[in-house]
Amino acid sequence: MKSGCFNSLVCYIDHLMSDPASNSTVVPTGDLVAAQKKFVGTKRQLLAAVLSAMIPGAGQLLLAQRRKGILLLLVFFVVASGVWPLRLPRFPAGLGLIGLCWLALSLYAAGTALLEHRNPADRRTSKWWLLAVPLLTYVGFNAVFTPLFLVAGFRALKFNSSAMETTLLTGDQFVIDKTFYRDHSVSHNDLVVLRREDYQTVKRVIALGGDTVGAKNREIIVNGRVVAEPFIRHTLALGTNQWMDSFGQITVPVGKYFVMGDNRDVSLDSRSPEFGLLDAQAITGKPLYIYRSPIKGRVGKKME
């Protein structure tokens, strides 16, 4: 090829690269590498934030922050051990303390993973991503805490009846311990969670297997003695439902229980042939305390 032709070709290529109207775009190699590096770095930090929101410290290990990651993991395992095997959610303060520590640790771990900036040559991840940290923490908390809570033997139930007022109100949400009666015997006046057909509810144990129970004018008599019941409620006049106010002496067979609701005038319980005596196998747990309620001042109330 002649020199003149070669120079003309070079000039033509230069023209294409510099002409604003041209459809061709040339990205300098250095800028492309920087853009790719920034994308990979941001993606890695987002993944680290997600991991740390679920298991604090895991994201730091992904970012090669070994010392910090191991420390956060150790603290996390200490907090998680409060759920199982220590089972601190048996107490309202225990559940509150574990929940606050868990959320604070997850927020910190996810936030610091997102803002990690080790190489000064790299551009920082936008701080707008911090707005996603609370959501990541919420999702991570439910993904890990809830299964651990269930493995430890706890459940959360919502009460949708007036049969236990004022011990339980409609809309109260409470924690139950499904393992309690594996190690404890059922006692008089115990509140128990029981399964009946396709739903669960709460009743109070009035009489045990071998007891004789009856009532006269709303006074409960167990083994010949009147039982003190400061927790009960009546909303109707005495005699409105005679069969609920007074009933004959019943001897409870071994392995069964006579149970009643605290709101005596509306509760469907062992006084009714439709409900009958409670089988021991129907007891699914013990209610512990209220953790959420539509009524102010009831959160943390122990159920006794």
Image (tube, rainbow, N blue to C red):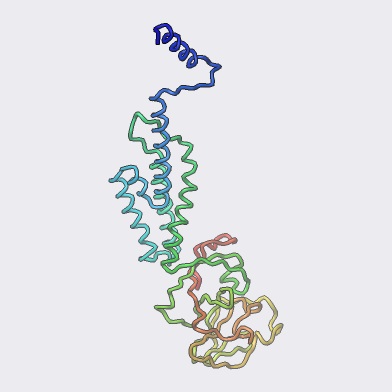
Q: x%, y% of residue 228? A: 54, 82
Toward the top, the furthest residue is 4
Residue shown at the point (43%, 35%) measured from the top left? 39
User: The N terminus appears in which quarter of the rendering?
Assistant: top left
Residue shown at the point (33%, 57%) measured from the top left? 78
Q: x%, y% of residue 157? A: 54, 67
Quarter where residue 31 is shown: top left
Relative depth, front residue between 32 and 13: 13
Q: Is residue 255 left or right of residue 274?
A: left
Relative depth, front residue between 184 and 187: 184
Q: Is residue 131 left or right of residue 64?
A: right
Q: Is residue 226 left or right of residue 31?
A: right
Quarter where residue 234 is shown: bottom right
Residue shown at the point (46%, 71%) measured from the top left? 177
In this view, 19 is above or below 216: above
In this view, 102 is above or below 129: below
In this view, 161 is above or below 227: above
Toward the front, the furthest residue is 1
Q: x%, y% of residue 208? A: 50, 87
